[in-house]
Amino acid sequence: MRFVVIGGGPAGNQAATTAARLGAEVTIIERDVIGGAAHLWDCIPSKAMIATGGAMGDLNKAEGMGLRRVSAEIDLDALKERITAIQTRLEGSVCGLLGSQGVRLVKGTGRLVGPHEIQVDTAEGSELLEADVIVLSTGSRPRIPDWAHVDGQRVLTTRDAYPPPELPSHLVVIGSGVTGVEFVHMFRSFGSDVTLIVSRQQVLPQKDPEVAAALEDNFLSRGVRLFKGARAEAIDVAPDGVVVRCDDGRQAKGSHVLLAIGSIPNSDNLGLEAAGVESESGYVIVDHNCRSSVPHIYAAGDLSGKLPLSSVASMQGRKIGEHAMGMHQAPHRHLDYEKAASAIFTEPEIADVGLAEADAFAEGRKIRVTKVPFSASAKALINDDPRGFVKIVSDPATGVVLGGSIVGRHAAELISVIALACTAGLRVGDLEECLLVHPALAEALAEAAE
């Protein structure tokens, strides 16, 4: 079985290693970085910077832990070296795993020239590959509107900010989704003044209003300016700063501006039409097995138009590898994107999974909602961080866990328990009866399940 993957991110890597273990002859084509540009150039650097900002915050709050006050300042050069070291180590780890499975790595750009043919352009020339199975996992890139002229100095995309050329004295962030709010938190932690332009009436418009309100309160308490109900439409650049003009007449002035208004799929020049692969708005249309309109061509990750999460991409890749190698011909459990856990690495952290309270009410669905604040947790008080809460949504008739939200320290780790409950169909009684560690933040999960 000749198995060719275009794009070496989480989806492509997982598809490749899975297929190779099952006996396929696998080739991965990657033009940028093995491990995925969106993963290693966006996700990992941003979380590394947030961790640095968190360390600064902990030092600056040392008095609350019974220590004499200490302080820290950002060192952009050292931070960049730290990020590069993490990226290099992770890329090396991925390359090592692929090599151990016998996967061939090709540095270049691949595009379909027929249903079974891929042309690969490398620094050495061109090569035509024949494949029995093709996986398209080319990812996405930051969306840049026509009115924004990115220069990498004053006007930045996310990939210009890991870290930026200089620390902004006042950063204007356009976009209040997950990426936007993480950058607000990150640069405010570094000491920059921050203005966030919010096109809706709440940050995180797709999230639970109570969760969004908790984050807004935190931003306001830290001095972040919110331009609610404003849509950016122009950026004026001067030698000493920027001015963002909004459709309601308001103007946000700062030293730098960051665009965080979504992404677009990397499907340009991929040759979808040449292979007969159907797409919509640049995303490949896939079925529950991640197959495109051409049965032996699969798509995964951001290109599939599903949830843009590395965890989802990896799982898609594994399922593709198994399906293509004949493991899922009988009825089986398919990916349930509604039960994918996600997290936002702000302060406090935010995480959720499954059915949201607001969505249930909008659908007229009967649910039971229980909530426990971390202010009642001994561990939260020990950590000197009692912010946030645990909320569990369940079926009132059966007690089955349908979803949940967590706001607070280590929310990204704690949500795994609720995610497992959702996926396995556990009841709130199953969580309540767990004998958990004391003192621990996880105790709030059992208390919320009571």
Image (spheres, grey):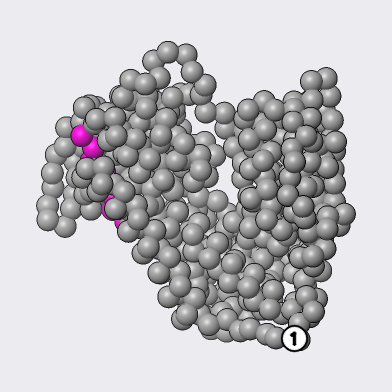
Residue 421 place in picture, x, y as percent: 67, 33
Q: Is residue 110 visible?
A: no
Visible in this render: residue 260? yes
- Whether residue 323 is in magenta: the answer is no
- Residue drawn 59% across the image and 66% down it: 50
Q: Nearer the viewer, residue 95 or 191?
A: 95
| Whole-percent x, y for residue 410 in the image | 68, 56
Give coordinates of residue 430: x percent, y percent. Answer: 74, 31
Query: Which residue does the image show at 75% across and 41% down from the upper left?
Result: 435
Check the image and report above or below for 207 versus 38.
above
Q: Nearer the viewer, residue 243 or 439?
A: 439
Across and down, in percent, residue 4 comes to 25, 36
- Residue on which the image places disc 1: 69
**In the image, what residue type sits under mark 1?**
Arg
| Up/down of 201 relative to 50, above or below | above
Which of the 4 quarters of the picture holds residue 339? top right
Choose between 165 and 444: the one closer to the eye.
Answer: 444
- Number of residue marks: 1
Q: Quadrant of the N terminus?
A: top left
Residue 321 falls in image quadrant: top left
417 relative to 259 in the view: left or right: right
Quadrant of the drawing holding the C terminus: top right
The one nearer the camera, 159 or 95, is 95
Q: Which residues are magenta?
A: 25-32
Residue located 77% across and 52% down the image: 438
Element marked by disc 1: loop
Residue 27 part of the magenta segment: yes
Residue lying furthest right? 376
